[in-house]
Image (cartoon, rainbow, N blue to C red):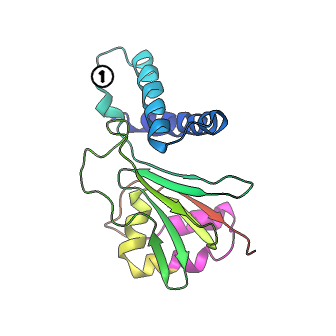
Amino acid sequence: ENAHYGSYWSSRLLAQSIDQHLRDGVPGIENMLERTRDELRQLFELRFTDGTKMRTIATTLVGLIAPIDGGPAAGFRVGDSDLLVAGPDGWTSVFGAPSSDVDAVFPRTVDADVAPLELDANCLLLATDGVAGPVASNDGVAMSFLDGLRAPVSEVEFDQLMSFPLEEARGDRTAVGIWFSPK
């Protein structure tokens, strides 16, 4: 029931943790996630003093670390969110199939799927399962996203893509599109 709190603070604290780790030269996404979990636990304990359990803030995470000056990039996820790459034939997960373990959520676990990335794709889509699932399983949704995201779009156009009318897809629909210019 507090997942909105977990997702809000996890994303902010994780961005800070990634930045600090890169500045300090501390390797390992797991270390970043561990630091973020510890900070989130402290915040949660300050905010909820009624004995509410940490499991009530369970959330999934998906992220991308891509230095602006080039160099190696990596994607990571905890849970069933995904990082999708647009290709000529459709969308491909950089991780493969998501875990079906319902306990594979942050901050309960910091066990992350990690994958190196070549940033030569036209578009990357970081998406929660409410978007990634239908893109992976429904050809109509997949093609709509592929056609609609060939080039950067306005917020209104992106919102229209996210509003696909698929009755069985009632999950959280959160996504970030990132486009790359050809070299």
- Number of callouts in the render? 1
Q: Residue at x 51, y 56 (%)?
A: 75
Residue 151, relative to residue 175: is it above or below? below
For the N terminus, give its image quadrant.
top left
Percent x, y of residue 91: 48, 75
**Span shown in magenta:** 144-165
- As drawn, the residue found furthest toward the bottom would be 89
Residue 76, relative to residue 44: is it above or below? below
For the C terminus, give its image quadrant.
bottom right
Residue 65, magenta (yes or no): no
Name the residue nearer the viewer: 104 or 142. Answer: 104
Percent x, y of residue 74: 54, 56
Residue tagged 1: 52
Q: Quadrant of residue 44?
A: top left
Q: Residue at x 72, y 53 (%)?
A: 68
- Looking at the rendered structure, the secondary structure element under dot 1 is loop
Name the residue nearer the viewer: 183 or 134. Answer: 183
User: Dot 1: within a 10 Å radius of its alpha carbon, few (fewer than 14), some, or many (20 or more) residues?
Assistant: few
Residue 104, relative to residue 19: is it above or below? below
Q: Amino acid at mark 1?
A: Thr
Name the residue nearer the viewer: 151 or 70. Answer: 70
Residue 160, magenta (yes or no): yes
Percent x, y of residue 155: 66, 60
Q: Residue at x 48, y 44 (%)?
A: 29
Percent x, y of residue 115: 47, 59
Q: Residue at x 63, y 54 (%)?
A: 66
Q: Quadrant of residue 23?
A: top right
Left or right: residue 19 versus residue 58 is right
Residue 121, relative to residue 103: is it above or below? below
